Amino acid sequence: MHKPITTCRDHLSTKNIMTDNKNQTINEETERQDAENTIAALTGQVSCPGGAEFGNEDATQCNGHKAGFVNIVGNPNVGKSTLMNDLVGERVSIITSKAQTTRHRITGIVNTPGYQIVFSDTPGVLKPNYKLQESMLSYAQGALTDADILLYVTDVVEDTTKNADFIARVAKETIPVLLVINKIDLLKNNGELEAIINSWKEILPNAEIFPLSAKEHFNVANLMARIVELLPPSPPYFGKDALTDKPARFFVTEIIREKILTTYDKEVPYSVEVMVEKFEEQERSIHIMATIFVERDSQKGILIGKGGSMLKKVGTAARKDIETFFDKRVYLELFVKVEPNWRNRENKLKAFGYIE
């Protein structure tokens, strides 16, 4: 079920995009529309009347079925996965504050009777230091070659010159490019946003610009409506009940890895890979056995913790999220194994699904 767009309650007003309104009693619908109109004026776009909700068939403006691939690219930590989850309406990509959280190319599918959108979340663009990162970069580069619509995501604090060679490739794209300026809830006034918009207009002059806050669900509906407008006529590429093309085991590994990323610091989270060894699903329960791979014995000790306390903490948090994801009771067993230098070993990267 898709979530309707909501107002950034503590940041929006009729005069400023971001302001404190704790002592104000402005009608939220009017406030949201005024803020969207301000953004529309800055970007030269028309906002959706009434803030169109996701799945609105009127947004298609098309009698036939439409379908297409919408690839999401950008640098690490700009909010690509948060945006993906918001657009899809389901939590298909894990989210943490750490860079390089997304390692794979992850598909999320939106279906309505009139259209199908196949979103693809990709790892952040980076300069690779080992073979795993080379694979991650290839996912982002590949996303430039097979999209019907490209979403380039940045945010309000990012250096616009970062990974300029990749941006130059985006600038040469002949498909529609939608530039998403995320995290506008961090800005204090319209002037700051206008300066950022003007800067990006010079870098990507052919892109349509959508300032928004994926975290606050602000202005995402306008982006979604434009995506629907740009979809080419096509039959669906997947079944109309499909949410993703990834198997159940993949989401188990991602949830466990997310808990490791949020529990540990320094190098440990980046040296970890997870593999599901057993996935037995019953009518009301699932029995899962998973192995967590690290590169050094010292990392294994840190991961397990004194008396197994840290591993138990990760397992408990992961089990709860897996139960929510599958809506079933889960019995989860975790094991830790040392696999030296796996991030640079081609056979291990193949086994973990990073390369074919």
Image (cartoon, rainbow, N blue to C red):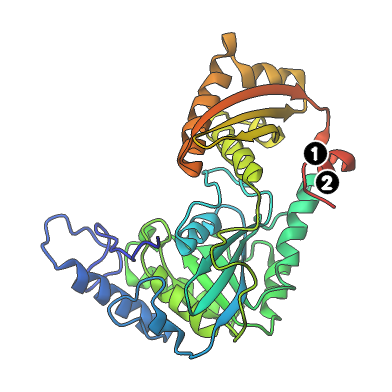
Quarter holding residue 193: bottom left
Extreme residue toward the top, this view: 307
Q: Name the residue located 18 percent from the left edge and 59 percent from the top edge.
A: 21
Q: Nearer the viewer, residue 122 or 280?
A: 280
Instruction: From the viewer's side, name the closer residue of 213 and 189.
Output: 213
Q: Is residue 15 left or right of residue 205?
A: left
- In the figure, 219 relative to 313: above or below? below
The image position of residue 265, as x and y in percent, is 58, 30
Q: Which mark is residue 296?
A: none
136 and 186: which is toward the camera: 136
Q: Residues within 10 Å of mark 2 (few under 14, many from 20)?
A: some
Task: Name the foreground residue: 148 vs 184.
Answer: 148
Q: CA distance from mark 1 to mark 2?
A: 6 Å
| 246 is higher (above) or lower (below) than 331 | below
Q: Amino acid at mark 1?
A: Arg
Relative to 104, residue 281 above or below: above
In screen coordinates, is 299 left or right of 321?
right
> Which of the two labelled residues, at mark 1 and mark 2, occupies the earlier sequence position?
2
Q: Amino acid at mark 2?
A: Lys
Residue at left offset 53%, top offset 34%: 262
Q: Check disc 1 and report the residue beneath it.
A: 343
Q: Secondary structure at mark 2?
A: helix
* Residue under label 2: 131
The number of numbered badges drawn on the structure is 2
> Is the Cβ of the residue at disc 1 closer than 8 Å to that at disc 2?
yes
Q: Quadrant of the N terminus?
A: bottom left
Identity of the residue drawn at 14% across and 68% down:
27
Q: Residue, x 38% and y 86% (percent of image)? A: 46
Tag 1 secondary structure: helix
